[in-house]
Amino acid sequence: MHPLRQTIDAVVPIDPGAMAQAREHQDRLTKPRGSLGVLEDVAVRLAGIAGACPPPLPTPVALAVFAADHGVHAQGVSPWPQEVTAQMVANFTAGGAVANAFAAQVGASLTVVDVGVASDLPPAPGLLSRKVAYGTADLSEGPAMTGEQAAEALAAGVRVAADLVASGNRCLVTGDMGIANTTASAALISVFTGRDAAAVTGRGTGVDDAMYHHKIDVVQRALRVNGLEGAVPEGPEAAVRALAAVGGLEHAAIAGFVLGAAAARVPVILDGVIAGSAALAAAAIAPDAIGYCVAGHRSAEPGHAVALAHLGLRPLVDLELRLGEGTGGLLAHPIVTAAARVMHDVATFDSAGVADKDA
Ligand SMILES: O=C(O)c1ccc[n+]([C@@H]2O[C@H](COP(=O)([O-])O)[C@@H](O)[C@H]2O)c1
Ligand SMILES: Cc1cc2nc[nH]c2cc1C
């Protein structure tokens, strides 16, 4: 049996009945039909996710930041030293990162999960040690992970989602920290969408022109060396193989986190390009999982828009962010909450005695 089989089987399509009810309810509220634009779609999706109309408010909300290192860093694809991954984990647990500020702003809890940081991390409050390896191997020279490592990281993500839901959270947000992980993200997006490396590779933390062109070459080489040019992987086995070949441990964990949220029927707000690339893997493993995803924002990384278009997800916020950590996902949470609150609080034409031109 596939190690993810139980989780995959628990991922059912979002509920069409509750969605139809939500659409009808939207049309009875005291506003011109359709006037809340994309928020109406978000509310309908939330109803489908919960199988209830009105949908529950997406609170409490929990951010999980999955941290890991990357062998491909040795190829010179990031201007930052690898040690920054571990240093930023310490910054998260000390409360000093942007994600901490945004989590405080929207009332989210923050859990950091070490799935593959290249050094031993001292225990700290809010830090879960789920280390699968001390970083991945270099994806441009061969598979980044073994199939077992990818499966272990996926399972860790599933478990973190299940535990956060079991402790009462009703919305999850993806976060990541991993120097060089935009290279693995570009490789995953190229593999799962069939688009050229040049179309999906970006400047990450801010690489210069020379490093940018080299980064595209590295992504191209990763696909060639791992035999991933051509066919787009479909189904759990091929998806996990591709994820293992060119992904990162945090990508695998985030894919598992998305599957875990879907299995628990809780919405998961996706952050930037790392989450987008991980969601492509999750979609190839269990296509119905994407119904449970809300695209929090669109990152400045070009591959992110490609991934979201492939998944059929529309980002809620577009502020040229390219930080990661879950920051764009957190900023979208009040918008998602507002979409749900409309369904609870707003009067209908009938109840408020407002004339409905279409009645
Ligand atoms: O979320 C995004 O779209 C995003 C875009 C660019 C960079 N990042 C963050 O920057 C780090 C990776 O950048 P790089 O240049 O080292 O590949 C990693 O920690 C990510 O969280 C994140
Ligand atoms: C300082 C710093 C903070 C980050 N947060 C997410 N990725 C990051 C990369 C760097 C370099």
Image (tube, rainbow, N blue to C red):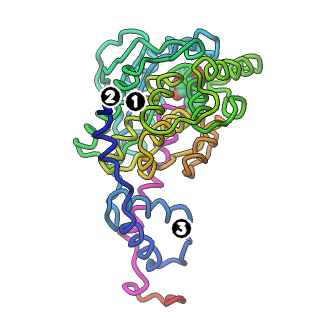
Magenta extent: 324-352
Magenta stretch containing residue 151, yes or no?
Answer: no
Which residue corresponds to the image point at 34% horizontal and 38% vertical from the top-left? 109
Question: Position of 273 compared to 26: left or right?
Answer: right
Above/below status of 126 relative to 6: above
Which residue corresponds to the image point at 63% horizontal and 43% vertical from the top-left? 305
Whichever of labels 2 and 3 marks the residue nearer the N terminus, that label is 3
Whichever of labels 3 and 1 marks the residue nearer the N terminus, that label is 3
Which residue corresponds to the image point at 30% horizontal and 24% vertical from the top-left? 128
Q: Which of 71 and 168 is in front in this view?
A: 71
Could you tell me which secondary element the residue under label 2 belongs to? helix
Q: How far apart are marks 2 and 3 (CA)?
A: 38 Å
Decide if ligand 1 comes within 8 Å of the CB at mark 3.
no
x and y percent of residue 130 in the render? 31, 21
Q: Distance between the residues labelled 1 and 2?
A: 6 Å
> Which label lies toward us, 2 or 3?
2
**Mark 1 and mark 2 residues within 8 Å of each other at the beta carbon:** yes
Q: Distance between the residues labelled 3 and 1?
A: 34 Å
Q: Which of 198 and 124 is in front in this view?
A: 198
| Residue under label 1 | 253
Label 1 neighbour load within 10 Å: few <14, some 14-19, many 20+: many
> Which label lies toward us, 3 or 1?
1
x and y percent of residue 293 in the render? 45, 48
